[in-house]
Image (cartoon, coloured by chain):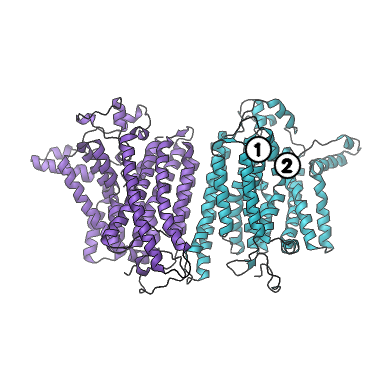
Chain colours: A purple, B cyan
């Protein structure tokens, strides 16, 4: 679900006059974003023969449109989950069911949104298309975060965003490198580490922003009132968020404009041309726009269900809320990207897999998280960047392990296996974490670290 | 204490491995073996030839090969002395010291015997054998300490082993090698080092999470709940670590063997003189096996003494149990490897030194530690992966410093010096650490204040 921009859009085929001086046509065709290339593996060519028989042109166009959008993906089979979830809500079926169905329904929606964004970009040109992709790519995470904020479930926000970063860094990357390594056992797998490096030092910047508010709570002495600490933490978090957003904008400028050549996909052999679909849009601009808006609304609806039913699901499935938010939600949300990254690793195109995984992680770490803080500031909810000790520790070590693993520019299956195992260990850690979570004043979610903060705000979790 | 760097030399034994020139094959010995071989001396068989009876001659030559075939033979005397001291109830600290000294040559001989066995079993099994038996001393000490419910000693000694390999062995090797080759650029292949490092980082993650779990919990949550969670997490992580270790073995011995080949060297003439041990085994398979079993039993006996007398020794020498377990035990246990790594660094063969040190550290971290947790699980003892904040932080920083130092593929004496000084600092830290440390199940580890004679160490 993360869109990342790796290349200006291939505009030459569309006849625009903005010819980028980038050499051969093959390079232009190669210049598709890693995200798009990875998602395209989940698409299938629409079979338009049945529709041709329909007499009315308007109806035919409409049906073509419908087929392209709804049925144009191998994940189409999950679409029935959406109406099922809506029906369940109205019939008052038990909440865990609604939760499960909503999660299933979100998967194809996320993939379709990225497809629509790619189609729209054919019309808007390279830079705007890249920006669109960057913003809309993480639509699901952003919408879930904002909805959870409005319900004052700050913990769910923090956990789900953290889980997204962890999932991209360890799970997606790990499975890609592992499968790619097994499939290319006799070949040396290389990738360009400059692109990976940019992502890593941005992630480390994000880590610093999370670490400092966390450390505030530990340097407090016994007689410092909790309110002062929270206040300091909040002010620091909000200023850091602004800085993170500035650095994200700089990253976009770097990636889309001044140092585009760093993010070029590696030179390909002839076999690649078979994989690329034709470069023309399959739906018109306005229908694409309408579909995008519609799908975003459906995503919002399903996310509303997810956020509302998460505690009940957690109780009835006997998993902690943190486990569901950190592990289950991102797996569902990232499923399309995940599959794509693995497929490209199989083909020994590691730059694309890395671009997908690391780019997503950077986007969430440096864009969605600070944006959520700013939104909560506007709404008036006190959310800070302190993600608590266990979560920040896992994040720190994940970034360090992944950065270290990728620093020499080669890959083999052992690297992927280790990253994958680290993800399992972190997942197990949150699985066994059955500590009750208190939420005094909505500040500290999850595991508490201050022994003397005991505020009786009622027995329920997330009670405001 | 063993590390696998290369498949066993099989061509001379008539197998058909296609590994290139004869010289490469001779180079293709495990780093551990090559380092230990520097401590061997050619047996002088002339005396024994005079003995008339053939069987007696065989036994004596066998004996000479095994017992006298090392420069550390002198320390063998400590073994009977330790047994004597135990029987006659001499001072416990004396037993402790003698047992420690006695363990040193035994560890070296076990690695020699394992190498000899590998001539018969072939490359892959030999490599596996080396991997398992190489760290026999650490494993035996750990299991015996577990059997006596001294979980702290287990944790400290294993941690100390990793620290000693990463900082002490590596530091002295790089330092001595750098001084000896001060005009030459020293290079090594960083790919092999990298594999070890990210496995060590994964091990660090497994230690970090239970530690953070303990700190993240409120004061109201019962200690038993936290311990239970930490225990479940540790046991599951141990299984994952063992899976990763098996994958590492597959990676090293089978699919990516070429990554672990020793570097090509130009001045090979000097090298050939050092490889004094001819490529044929010097003792028969069954005698080898018998010696191996016998030596392991003696190691077990001495380790039993060590584990039993560690507290008294710590009391009478004025050092904390933590210091003895983290610093002294591993120095003794690793002595043979240590000497070998330094010698090879002198000869500018850094790949071998790195293979020894890093391979050992990885083995202990990803094999011996999770194995101890699993054995504790089977025995019903509550050992988790939470090594407490001071130890875990030293481990974390040691791994990070070493990984960073070695990441460019070259070396000079300054790198070695820094690693060495880091080890000295950590040793100083544990030396001054006189804080009694409470274990979750209520036992107290560390130096007890003298006015508290009732509660002994590790009281259950």
User: Residue shown at 30%/50% (left/top)?
Assistant: A107
Residue behind mark 1? B30
Mark 2: few/some/many CA within 10 Å (<14, 14-19, 20+): many
**B319 in relation to A363, above or below:** below
Q: Which residue is at the front of the view, B1 or B390?
A: B390
Where residue A400 appears, as percent x and y from the top left, is 47, 47
**A49 in relation to A27, above or below:** below
Quadrant housing residue B453: bottom right
Q: Judge left or right: residue A250 versus residue A87.
A: right
Q: Judge left or right: residue A418 versus residue A29.
A: right
Q: Secondary structure at mark 2?
A: helix
In whole angstroms, how far apart are the C-alphas of marks 2 and 1?
Answer: 12 Å
Q: Is residue A346 visible?
A: no
**Is disc 2 in contact with disc 1, using a CB cutoff of under 8 Å?**
no
Chain of the residue under the numbered disc 2 shown in the image: B
The quadrant the C terminus of chain B occupies is bottom right
Residue behind mark 2? B112
Where residue B364 appears, as percent x and y from the top left, is 61, 50
Quadrant housing residue B382: bottom right
Q: Is residue B5 visible?
A: yes
Where residue A182 appears, as percent x and y from the top left, is 46, 39
Q: Secondary structure at mark 1?
A: loop
> Disc 2 or 1, which lies upstream in sequence?
1
Mark 1: few/some/many CA within 10 Å (<14, 14-19, 20+): many
Q: Which residue is at the front of the view, A132 or B269?
A: A132
Q: Which mark is residue A113?
A: none
Q: Which residue is at the front of the view, A28 or B22?
A: A28
Q: Judge left or right: residue B340 versus residue A423.
A: right
Where residue B378 appears, as percent x and y from the top left, is 60, 61
Chain of the residue under the numbered disc 1 shown in the image: B
């Amino acid at each position: 679900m993360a869109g990342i921009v790796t290349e200006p859009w291939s505009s030459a085929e569309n006849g625009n006059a903005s010819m980028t001086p980038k050499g051969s046509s093959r390079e232009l065709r190669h210049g598709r974003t890693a995200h798009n290339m990875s998602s395209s593996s989940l698409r299938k060519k629409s079979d338009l023969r049945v529709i041709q028989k329909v007499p009315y042109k308007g109806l035919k166009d409409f049906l073509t449109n419908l087929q392209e959008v709804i049925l144009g993906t191998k994940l189409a089979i999950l679409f029935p989950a959406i109406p099922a979830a809506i029906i369940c809500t109205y019939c008052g079926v038990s909440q865990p069911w609604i939760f499960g169905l909503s999660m299933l329904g979100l998967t194809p929606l996320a993939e379709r949104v990225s497809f629509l964004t790619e189609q729209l970009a054919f019309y808007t040109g390279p830079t705007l298309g890249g920006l669109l992709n960057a913003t809309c790519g993480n639509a699901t995470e952003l919408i879930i975060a904002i909805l959870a904020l409005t319900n004052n479930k700050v913990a769910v926000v923090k956990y789900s965003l953290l889980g997204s970063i962890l999932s991209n860094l360890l799970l997606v990357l790990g499975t890609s490198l592992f499968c790619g390594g097994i499939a290319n056992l006799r070949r040396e797998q290389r990738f360009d580490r400059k692109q990976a490096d940019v992502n890593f030092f941005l992630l480390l910047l994000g880590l610093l922003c999370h670490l400092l508010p966390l450390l505030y709570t530990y340097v407090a002495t016994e007689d410092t009132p909790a309110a002062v600490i929270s206040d300091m933490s909040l002010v620091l978090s909000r200023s850091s968020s602004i800085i993170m957003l500035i650095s994200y904008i700089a990253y976009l400028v770097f990636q889309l404009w001044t140092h585009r050549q760093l993010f070029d996909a590696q030179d390909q052999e002839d076999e690649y041309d078979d994989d690329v679909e034709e470069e023309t849009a399959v739906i018109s601009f306005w229908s694409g726009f309408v579909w995008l808006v519609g799908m975003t609304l459906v995503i919002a609806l399903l996310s509303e269900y997810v956020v509302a039913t998460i505690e009940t699901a957690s109780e009835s499935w006997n998993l902690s809320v943190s486990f569901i938010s950190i592990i289950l939600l991102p797996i569902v949300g990232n499923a399309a990207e995940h599959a794509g990254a693995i497929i490209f690793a199989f083909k020994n195109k590691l730059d694309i897999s890395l671009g997908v995984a690391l780019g997503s992680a950077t986007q969430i770490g440096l864009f969605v998280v600070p944006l959520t803080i700013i939104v909560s500031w506007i709404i008036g909810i006190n959310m800070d960047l302190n993600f608590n000790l266990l979560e920040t520790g896992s994040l720190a070590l994940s970034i360090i392990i992944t950065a270290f693993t990728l620093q020499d520019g080669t890959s083999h299956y052992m690297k992927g296996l280790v990253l994958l195992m680290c993800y399992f260990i972190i997942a197990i850690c949150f699985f066994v974490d059955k500590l009750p979570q208190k939420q005094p004043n909505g500040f500290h979610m999850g595991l508490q670290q201050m022994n003397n903060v005991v505020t009786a705000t009622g027995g329920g979790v997330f009670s405001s | 204490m063993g590390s696998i760097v290369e498949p066993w030399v099989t061509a001379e034994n008539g197998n058909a491995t296609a590994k290139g020139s004869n010289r490469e094959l001779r180079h293709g010995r495990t780093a551990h073996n090559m380092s230990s071989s520097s401590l061997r001396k050619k047996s002088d068989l002339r005396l024994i030839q005079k003995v008339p009876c053939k069987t007696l001659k065989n036994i004596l030559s066998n004996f000479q090969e095994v017992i006298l075939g090392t420069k550390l033979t002198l320390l063998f005397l400590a073994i009977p002395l330790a047994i004597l001291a135990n029987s006659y109830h001499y001072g416990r600290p004396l037993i402790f010291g003698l047992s420690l000294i006695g363990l040193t040559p035994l560890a070296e001989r076990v690695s020699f015997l394992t190498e000899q066995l590998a001539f018969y079993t072939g490359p892959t099994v030999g490599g596996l054998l080396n991997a398992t038996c190489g760290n026999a001393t650490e494993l035996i000490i750990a299991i015996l300490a577990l059997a006596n419910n001294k979980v702290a000693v287990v944790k400290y000694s294993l941690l100390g082993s990793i620290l000693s390999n990463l900082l002490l062995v590596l530091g002295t090797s790089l330092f001595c090698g750098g001084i000896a080759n001060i005009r030459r650029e020293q290079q090594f292949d960083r790919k092999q080092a990298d594999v070890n490092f990210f496995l060590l980082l994964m091990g660090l993650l497994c230690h970090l999470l239970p530690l953070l779990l303990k700190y993240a919990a409120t004061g109201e949550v019962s200690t038993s709940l936290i311990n239970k969670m930490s225990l479940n997490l540790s046991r599951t992580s141990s299984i994952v670590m063992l899976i990763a270790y098996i994958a590492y073995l597959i990676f090293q011995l089978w699919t990516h063997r070429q990554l672990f080949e020793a570097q090509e060297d130009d001045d090979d003439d000097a090298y050939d003189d050092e490889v004094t041990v001819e490529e044929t085994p010097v003792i028969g398979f069954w005698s080898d096996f018998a010696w191996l079993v016998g030596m392991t039993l003696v190691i077990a006996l001495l380790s039993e003494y060590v584990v039993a007398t560690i507290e008294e020794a710590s009391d009478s020498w004025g050092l904390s149990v933590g210091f003895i377990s983290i610093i002294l035990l591993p120095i003794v246990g690793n002595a043979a490897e240590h000497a070998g790594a330094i010698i090879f660094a002198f000869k500018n063969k850094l790949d071998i030194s790195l293979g020894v040190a890093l391979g050992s550290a990885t083995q202990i971290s990803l094999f011996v530690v999770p194995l101890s947790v699993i054995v504790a699980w089977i025995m019903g003892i509550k050992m988790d992966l939470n090594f407490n904040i001071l130890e875990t932080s030293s481990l974390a920083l040691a791994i990070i410093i070493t990984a960073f130092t070695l990441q460019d593929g070259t070396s000079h004496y300054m790198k070695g010096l820094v690693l060495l000084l880091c080890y000295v600092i950590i040793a100083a830290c544990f030396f001054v650490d006189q804080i009694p440390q409470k274990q979750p199940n209520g036992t107290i580890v560390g130096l007890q204040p003298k006015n508290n004679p009732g509660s002994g160490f590790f009281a259950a």
